[in-house]
Amino acid sequence: MSASTPKTLCTSGQQSIQDICHPLSAEESVRTPSPDVGNTTGSIGEKDLSLPNGTPVDTSSPASSSSLLNRLQLDDDLDGETRDLFVTVDDPKKHVSTMETYITYRVSTKTTRVEFDLPEYSVRRRYQDFDWLRIKLEETQPTHLIPPLPEKFVMKGVVDRFSEEFVETRRKALDKFLKRVADHPVLSFNEHFNVFLSAKDLNAYKKQGLALLTKMGESVKYVTGGYKLRGRPLEFAAMGDYLDVFTQKLGTIDRIAQRIIKEQSEYLVELREYGPVYSSWAGFEGPLQEPLEGVAGCVANCATALDELTEDMSDDFLPVLREYVLYIESMKTVLKKRDHVQAEYEAKLEAVAFRKEERTAQPPTDVEKCQDRVECFNADLKADWDRWQNNKRQDFRQLLTGMADRNIQYYEKCLAAWESIVPLLQDRPGSTKTETS
């Protein structure tokens, strides 16, 4: 399918641009059950007492530690039965040569689409190949939101880019990037994406290119002669305002989460020093030896549980926050592109208005084409905004549910550890109470 196929318009639905509510307006939260658009300061717990499909959520303490994720049934899952393209990124391998050292990942594809010659592919790609794909998607699909890639060099808290931790974190991010592209009704048909998934030698395509810069792509060079946009339509201005607020909230949460992880790590160091003291003390005590060793084991179990909780927060919670920070940057970029197209259209309209001989005539063809580009951009951006909001709702619901579940598991493990030593500390007939009185 060509990148310029007008099929992109079918993703935007029948709703007109003027009917879109401000994402932060109170009306939006009343109209839809989604907790993501608006109510950025409200209580999540109050909104999620029941799922959108009517399934009640039990807010009482679960009987087992793994209950929340098992109970939660997301009604937002895309219709997996109708999907015809599945992509995974796994099996990272380190390559060392005299010139450079780098990591490649296996990209596996299964599909029934006629655009592919085979039903299955398995190729190896390095980070710069993913970067090439994203650049090409931005060039050929300028009206669409392109999912973000993880940063190339810097990841907070990670120094060695060849460490297992760094490689696994990047692998997850690259896998999510390709899955988001594969699930998109327009981007997934991009010819560059097809080549990325199927070509054994991607370098050959990188050098020669596919000559797929469409007229739409060429038109979004935005040479408007310094014309200043009169103002975004209300729905797109609302999008910009929402992104500003969302950025602020995510930044605050990220900073607090970083402090929590730091404090947990410091507490973990103390726990690991604390437990052995009881063990060494037990060697000098007779009647107290068993209870002291029990306390030492309890502290060790609590330390293990805290280590798991901190690791989960670093590996699962923080990367999602960072991905959405990058997503916001991508969305703002698309909004700016839309503004440039609108500014070009307004400039052409004013130029026509100043020509007396054309004041009563029909707008010239180039003005009509520019108007079409604006309408196309608006429709595609609105469709991608809705899709992004839906994805965000799913991601954060799973993220927060997982975080709650892991905290429950942590405290249950700590409770079980302390309860296990209570019998050792209780008075028994003929024990230490008589001997020490």
Image (spheres, helix red, strand yellow):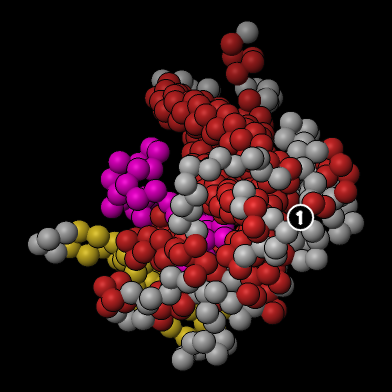
Position in image of residue 354 (x %, y %):
62, 48
Residue at 26% from the left image edge and 73% from the top image edge: 207
Q: Which residue is mark 1?
A: 17
In-front residue for pair 4/169: 4
- Res 417 quadrant in image: top right
Residue 153 magenta = yes
The quarter of the picture where the C terminus appears is top right
Residue at 34% from the left image edge and 69% from the top image edge: 125
- Res 184 quadrant in image: bottom right
Q: Extreme top residue here?
A: 437
Q: Extreme front residue here?
A: 357
Residue 279 visible in image: no
In-front residue for pair 363/144: 363
User: Magenta segment, principal secondary structure?
Assistant: loop
Neighbour tally class for label 1: few under 14, some 14-19, many 20 plus, Cα within 10 Å: some
Position in image of residue 19 (x %, y %):
82, 52
Residue at 61% from the left image edge and 61% from the top image edge: 367
Position in image of residue 102 (x %, y %):
25, 60
The quarter of the picture where the N terminus appears is bottom right
Residue at 30% from the left image edge and 41% from the top image edge: 159
Magenta segment, which residues? 140-167
Q: Which amino acid type is shown beneath numbered disc 1? A: Ile
In-front residue for pair 359/423: 359
In the shown orientation, is residue 141 left or right of residue 396?
A: left
Q: Extreme left residue here?
A: 98
Residue 119 magenta = no
Provide the secondary structure element on which disc 1 rests: helix
Picture layout, residue 385 above or below residue 197? above
In the shown orientation, is residue 406 left or right of residue 326?
A: right
- Res 371 quadrant in image: bottom right
Position in image of residue 75 (x %, y %):
78, 61
